[in-house]
Image (spheres, rainbow, N blue to C red):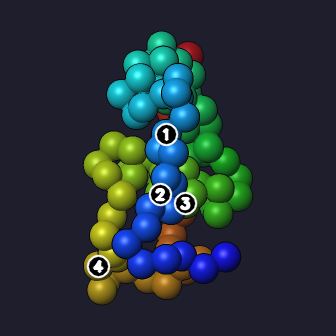
Amino acid sequence: MKFTKGTSGNPKGRPKGSLDLPEVRKLLARHSATFEAKLLELLNHEDRRVQMEALRLGYAYLYGKPLGLPSHFPPLGMARAPPQLPLPD
């Protein structure tokens, strides 16, 4: 399907009753402790790829998605594993 220049790709707009980002955040706020516990669990996972993905997502949500990697970062898959963090009781 080709798009016509100057024409909206979503002419009807957002469906009535759909949630916007602040509403979604408000609904998920009560689950923050569960998210934090799961993130800590994934940071201590035996698979380094899982650890790195948990770090990537955690940082993205804490500090915003990075615009790019600094030049001193090693290629993906070559980074050292993060330190083991204690799990909550």
| Mark 3 element type | helix
* Of the image marks 4 and 1, the number of the one nearer the N terminus: 1
Residue at image location 39% in from the left, 52% down from the top: 60
| Mark drawn on residue 14 | 1
* Of the image marks 2 and 1, the number of the one nearer the N terminus: 1
Circle 2 or circle 3, nearest the eye: 2
| Mark drawn on residue 56 | 2
Residue at image location 49% in from the left, 52% down from the top: 11
Q: Which residue is mark 4?
A: 70
Marks 1/3 in contact by CB < 8 Å: the verdict is no
- What amino acid is at disc 4? Pro
- What amino acid is at disc 2? Arg
Q: Is residue 52 left or right of residue 65?
A: right
How many angstroms separate mark 3 from mark 4 (CA)? 16 Å
* Of the image marks 3 and 4, the number of the one nearer the N terminus: 3
Does residue 58 sit above or below 47 in this rendering? Answer: above
Q: Which residue is mark 3?
A: 52
- What amino acid is at disc 1? Arg
